Image (tube, rainbow, N blue to C red):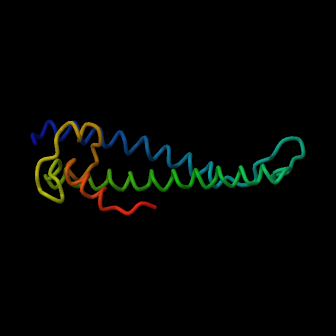
Amino acid sequence: MKKAEMKVYRDRLLDLRSRLRGDVSSMTQAALRKGGVDGANGSSMPIHMAELGSDNFEQEFTLSLLANEEDRLGMIELALQRIEDGNFGICEQCEGAIPKTRLNAIPYTPVCVKCAETRDQRAPLH
């Protein structure tokens, strides 16, 4: 891959990392917010048990999203390191070239489509 192309992907990854860091920060604040005042009663406790369940579900959902975003940030960091090492765009499994269409869609991917499909077929379903 040419240096100019690497720079384009590097800039794209840096922009994505910056945006995700902002999202992660705001999600963390939302998920871990304590002491929020609820309505007219001035308390932070929900009035009804259904509200408590809804609040718990919302917090767990946000924490799940947060974990996914943290994983993606880690993958972005690894992709930036691959750019620095000069092996960005090379599949980590088969060492073949990762198509630019795949890199345009998922610039932090470490594997080509064929290896990703193989990995996904072997992955157990939860």
Residue placed at 16% from the left, 56% from the top? 85
Vertical placement of residue 68 versus 101, above or below: below
Of residues 33 and 68, the one drawn nearer to the viewer in this rendering: 68
Residue 89 in picture, x, y percent from top left = 17, 47
**In terms of image quadrants, where is residue 1?**
top left
Residue 45 in picture, x, y percent from top left = 82, 54
Name the residue furthest right: 41
For residue 6, side relative to residue 56 (left or right): left
For residue 107, side relative to residue 60 (left or right): left
Of residues 102 and 12, the one drawn nearer to the viewer in this rendering: 102
**In terms of image quadrants, where is residue 17?**
top left
Residue placed at 50% from the left, 44% from the top? 23
Vertical placement of residue 15 versus 119, above or below: above
> How many numbered discs, if any?
0
Residue 26 in picture, x, y percent from top left = 56, 45
Q: Is residue 30 visible?
A: yes
**In terms of image quadrants, where is residue 7?**
top left
Q: Is residue 80 visible?
A: no
Residue placed at 43% from the left, 40% from the top? 19
Residue 79 in picture, x, y percent from top left = 26, 51
Residue placed at 48% from the left, 44% from the top? 22
